[in-house]
Amino acid sequence: MDQFHDIRPYNDDEVATVLTNLVNNPDFIETIIGFRFSACPKMLRGPLRVLLRWILRRQVSKIHNVNDFQRKVAAYMERMIKTTTTEVEYRGIDKLEKGVGYLFISNHRDIAMDPAFVNYGLYLHGLETVRIAIGDNLLRRPFVSDLMRLNKSFIVKRSANGVREMMAAFTQLSHYINHSIINDHSNIWIAQKEGRAKDGLDKTDIAIIKMFYMSQKKECSFAEAMQKLNIVPVSISYEYDSCDVAKASELYAKSKTGNYEKSEFEDIDSLTQGIVGHKGKVVVTFGDKLTQAFETPEDLVAEVDRQIITNYEIHQSNMTAYNMLNAEAEVDATFATRIAKCPKKLETTLLEMYANPLVQKKAYDEK
């Protein structure tokens, strides 16, 4: 019995059926038209749907397994990098070994692009791509779930109700992550906490670390279990955040009213904007594998946080935001212009978002 069937990525023998269902999914077709052909007159949308399905059928007929699908994704990734970034730099990736399954615990700024940039770096260096942890809050539309699982994503059941259901979901997730690394020697990507660090402050949620151990408590000590997982902290930094104004709006609303209600498909909109928006320079730093025996979750969290924060690349945007908040003279004109275009009421919130990685890094340096 496949104990992970409801959360795992799709297997090679499932790819053809899933792709066929996607091509025949009206919601999927309408989303593509809305995204790529929004200016198309309504009277022409009928023929466009027929043409689009024909083109997609031809394309998917050449995809027979997950590797074929990911090669297609890599081609789109190359195009995206050319159009939305000025440079992408990978650091520390030479320390990774082929044939070893790693648990990459990453800071989280962008829904889709964080794991995508990690994946692309591994792909370029001839290493196995990651199985990606993704919350079920992003999978309200069935075609999104299919696309994600085709790209080696596995589902985190955040919407589980009640203590018993939550415990069962997280125990299953723990089993899956341990099985992937120890038995399958596959890489895993997971964010250091639920949701993006919208305020620019990176902090690992201890509950995630405890989840890794849930399925291993009867087998070994916490320290032994964590050493088997080959944990590598990953720090991702963007010169410009494609969703910065949207994040600032949410933070501002929470600061004024204590509450913020997301629209139904707001996360999907953020995912899309993260892909197409301008990012400037992107730096992905793979830290050192955790080889020390960490006796408690607190000790492990402290080391993951240390590596993520100290390895975070500080861009000119971060320094300029810090200087603008502190009324210092050295200001980058490009970033200042970007800030000037945002609503005035969001300006301080936006500057704090960009300045906080530097504030956090300075605090570690002072230690």
Image (spheres, grey):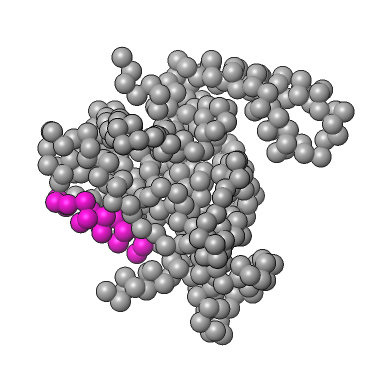
Look at 37% across and 69% down and name the residue there: 361
**Residue 149, image x and y in percent?**
47, 29
**Residue 66, image x and y in percent?**
47, 25
Name the foreground residue: 348 vs 187. Answer: 348
Q: Which of the 4 quarters of the picture holds residue 271?
A: top right
Look at 54% across and 84% down and name the residue there: 327
Q: Quadrant of the N terminus?
A: top left
Look at 57% across and 27% down and name the residue there: 143
Left or right, residue 38 beside residue 77: right
Q: Is residue 244 visible?
A: no
Q: Quadrant of the C terminus?
A: bottom left
**Residue 170, image x and y in percent?**
31, 35
Residue 136 magenta: no
Count of numbered circles in the view: 0
Name the foreground residue: 122 vs 339. Answer: 339
**Residue 162, image x and y in percent?**
35, 35
> Where 13 sits versus 126, above or below?
above
> Where 8 sits versus 321, above or below?
above
> Where 69 sits versus 231, above or below?
above
Left or right, residue 154 beside residue 277: left
Name the foreground residue: 193 vs 286. Answer: 193
Residue 306 magenta: yes
Q: Which of the 4 quarters of the picture holds residue 79?
A: top right
> Where 117 sits versus 5, above or below?
below
Q: Which residues are magenta?
A: 292-310
Q: Is residue 13 visible?
A: yes
Look at 51% across and 50% down and name the residue there: 110
SS majority, magenta: helix
Left or right, residue 149 beside residue 210: right
